[in-house]
Amino acid sequence: MSRIAIALGLSLLALAAEAAPAVPEDLLAVLTLRGKPCGKIASFERKGESDYIVTCTDGHKYRVFIGPGDRVVIEDK
Amino acid sequence: MFARSARIPFGLVGLAACALLACGEPEPEPAPAPPAAEAPVPPERTPEPRASAPVPAPAPPAPAPAPPEAAARPGTPAPAPPSADSSLSLEELGQRIRQTPAIGAFSKLSLKNDLDDLVDGLRNYHARKEGDLEDLHQRYEALVLKLITLLEDDEPELALALTRSRERIWSRLVDPVEFAKLST
């Protein structure tokens, strides 16, 4: 019984993980939407709630966070 | 989550343009906290087609009469019927875009920022009857194009519905009476 529950839980977790774009995909998408060159995301570091430092494969580095007025802010680093 | 979003003093509460995007969308807090050091990026996953949520079917466009030769030809696949949601209302589109998992939270919020700016421009245009409507139209088209690009892989039906509805949506936005209705 517990095995079934574990299997079910794992399946649900897998489904949940697939439901939304992963963080790097979302970060790359928002950089693209704002016309920021990046290539691909090489790495990212979470600095706080909705605040990330992103390093791109082309060498660009950005801070992506939510600023005043719920606006997405992208700063070159 | 998006409590901050809820606090935004939307001048146009219920504005359908606002409804297009992330009003009420969870705040971008999607990340399971990566390791303290830089997290390696997982290999790109190829988007798999997902079954999209069932959508209440609006009245389909008037069916065109089938050409007789197509009906008469045996073995010829029947032309695909128009998608059930090929034409959605602004409100339905907004609801579906808010709910779609195909767009991440940061992206939704960024698009919503663009949309808010566009709505501000339209509000000024309608209030003063001045401004560059062509510029506003181009910004609208760019915004729709971004949305379609983000949706086309995982939500092709929604992308198609948006494509088919975009002229109608624009015509509502530039009509001062319709815009005022949306604003209330």
Image (spheres, rainbow, N blue to C red):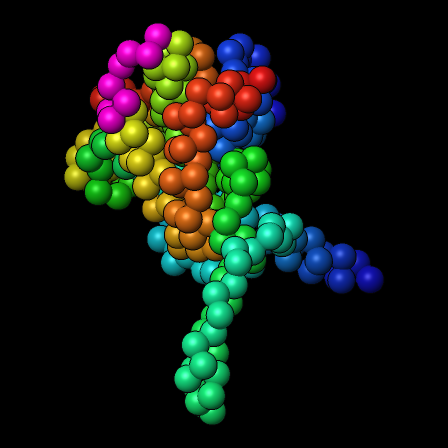
Q: Quadrant of the N terminus of chain B?
A: top right
Q: How many marks?
A: 0
**Drawn side of residue A15 relative to residue B168, left or right:** right
**Residue B25 percent location from the top left of the image:** 55, 30
Inspect the magenta stretch and tell me whether residue B154 lies in it: no
Residue drawn at 27 percent across, 14 percent down: B131
User: In the orientation shown, which residue stands out farthest toward the right?
Assistant: A1
**Drawn side of residue A54 relative to residue B155, left or right:** left
**Drawn side of residue A60 relative to residue A16, left or right:** left
From the viewer's side, name the closer residue of A69 and A28.
Answer: A69
Up-down relation of residue A8 to residue B41 (above or below):
below
What's drawn in magenta, residue-wise?
B128-135
**Residue A12 percent location from the top left of the image:** 65, 53
Residue drawn at 33 percent across, 12 percent down: B129
User: In the orientation shown, which residue stands out farthest toward the bottom?
Assistant: B74
**Residue A41 percent location from the top left of the image:** 29, 40
User: In the orientation shown, which residue stands out farthest toward the top?
Assistant: B128
Q: Can residue B147 be seen in this snapshot?
A: no
From the viewer's side, name the closer residue of B21 and A28.
Answer: B21
Up-down relation of residue B42 to residue A55 (above or below):
below
Residue drawn at 36 percent across, 11 percent down: B124
Q: Can residue B121 be seen in this snapshot?
A: yes
Quarter-wise, where is residue A2 in the image?
Answer: bottom right
From the viewer's side, name the closer residue of B103 and B166.
Answer: B166
**Residue B80 percent location from the top left of the image:** 47, 70
Q: Quadrant of the C terminus of chain B?
A: top right
